[in-house]
Image: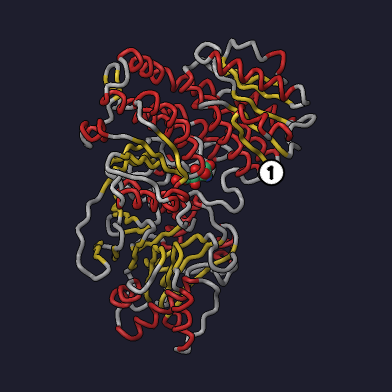
Amino acid sequence: MCGIVGYVGPNDTVDVLLNGLRRLEYRGYDSAGIAVIDASGEVSVRKRAGKLARLEELLEASPVSATGTGIGHTRWATHGGPTDENAHPHLGDGGKLALIHNGIVENFVELRGELEADGITLISDTDTEVVAALVGREVARQGDLETAFRAVVARLRGTFTLLAMHRDEPGKVVSARHHSPLVVGLGEGENFLGSDVAAFVSSTRRAVAVDEDNIAIITPDEVRITDFAGNPVEFTEYEVEWDATASEKGGWSSFMAKEINDQPEAVDNTLRGRITGDHVEIPELTELGDDLLRDIERVVIIACGTASYAGQIAAYAIEQWARIPAEVQLSHEFRYRDPVLTERTLVISVSQSGETMDTLMAVKYASEHGARTVSVCNTQSATIPRESDAVVYTHAGPEVAVASTKAFVAQITALYLVGLHLGHVRGTLSAEASAQAVRQFEALPAKVREAVETHEQIEQLAHWMADTRSVLFLGRHVGYPVALEGALKLKEIAYIHAEGFAAGELKHGPIALIDHGQPVFVLVPSPRTAPIMHSKVVSNIQEIRARGARVIAIVEKGDTAVLPFADDVIRLPLADVFFEPILQVIPLQWFALELSTAKGLDVDQPRNLAKSVTVE
Ligand code: AGP
């Protein structure tokens, strides 16, 4: 979704803004723009539909020299198409004020009518220009930016992060947040604003997360935060855990390729500090109190997309280890079903970004209805963890590619740790089972590395299958959500029709899709640890093979039972059944990446998608 950067300080403002926007590109966008106070003291805007390169071309053709105050924006269109006019920044007060916005202003039609009745002409289709015009009109009436900004912000409904600057107050940027993220970057003689820390992490790792319904005002030497009424608010700074290089591509062809390779470390880092001897102990959960955890009667995992598949996998494990009924619900469906929630319901949200609006709203709903909330999140100080009773961070490092990979394996890891912690505290997990899980975890990073090495084989496969128009994925038990994830990856970055099915469901309908040459990936459970499921899946393979499917079997090393029926076999290291998904998903990630590459598509920024979905 939209990216935001604001800057006040002595450095080349255009450079700082472009650098920030470049690092925010991953969020997904379709136009970009900047506004600065130029050498003549006026507000200058450059904006263009399309990628950042188009804005850079414009700046080359029409350079602007700035004096240390600027705002920049990448837009993901909501109101009005991705055109030059609709791109941000938008102007108010006769061009003296510039403003950028993330989110949706829901009462913009009414506000637009008010402005038009006042004789103000608007040139774009956006809700944002309405806000710029309102703040501009208010500055003209009240005389100063801060007062005007506060007055307008209080009138807006919907979701927003807003940044504004005015010609008459150089060296100052004002900002506000309401259901949309905003962070301040603290520098020496310079300060920054961003929709996330990527906007400024190459300049400073000192950050402040602005709270809900607060306003932040930055000048080169000062940061002030107030509530919407103007009352000062105290804030604490934190240090961003990763540095700028962690969000750079390095030598990789794409961020997704880099992030698939990062997975052994992502798992390792998520495990660190959470295993004590032969059992799992998560300090963040210990703080909730063992009594509370012992009283939990039901676990509901809420998430969207890939994160929901991590939740589906973990629900099997949590139920087994902690003997608590565990279910998964899509965040955007959750509150509309009027769920039964009590103080003995543990709602676990899963979100890489920690800003997904659907999940955030579901967490708030759960809290308001008395449930306990734990967030599994990859982004420090994001909104969802701050709205939750406790947070278990995944330490996968920044994930830039829109297609989630390392966050997924880290989410499964973290959720398993939660399940084992609950099992330990509640006494439902035997010492032997606990020790066995710990041994599986300890061996996991090396096995993940081995799974990453399937790349070459998958590259070949994808090369042969470059013209494929439809791919199916089959799995059972924890393999079923892996099948869903394999299909999602292919849809989002290779734009290929793909479906994931529970293998047992095949005969209830989907088998009608099988025709000569139809590629089907089958996730085959271990014959050692899940012999019954294994033999059922082998039967499913025979059924689809008999109808002409091209079977690509993902098996553990040494499993020869499928060989007579598979066209291709991908072999993975041995692991207990719950740990197989973390390995099985990796060849599927590579497959999607390679098909996307073969089709000449943008692997990291697929069409129509945004990295973090901050609108409902
Ligand atoms: C994953 O490849 C997707 N881009 C998407 O499904 C994502 O997992 C989902 O939007 C949830 O995002 P979150 O983890 O940041 O909440």
- Circle 1 Cα neighbour tier, 10 Å, few/some/many (<14 / 14–19 / ≥20): few
The residue closer to the viewer here, 358 or 11, is 358
Q: Is residue 225 visible?
A: yes
Q: How is the image coloured?
A: secondary structure
Name the residue located 38 percent from the left edge and 18 percent from the top edge: 437
Left or right, residue 315 beside residue 609:
left
Identify residue for label 1: 600
The residue closer to the viewer here, 70 or 235, is 235
Percent coordinates x, y for residue 471 in the rendering: 69, 35
Percent coordinates x, y for residue 162 in the rendering: 39, 66
Name the residue located 54 percent from the left edge and 23 percent from the top edge: 451
Residue 218: image quadrant is bottom left
Secondary structure beneath dot 1 equals: loop
| Amino acid at dot 1 | Gly
Percent coordinates x, y for residue 603 in the rendering: 60, 43
Percent coordinates x, y for residue 514 in the rendering: 74, 31
Please count the marks in the image. 1
**Label 1 beta carbon within 8 A of ligand 1:** no
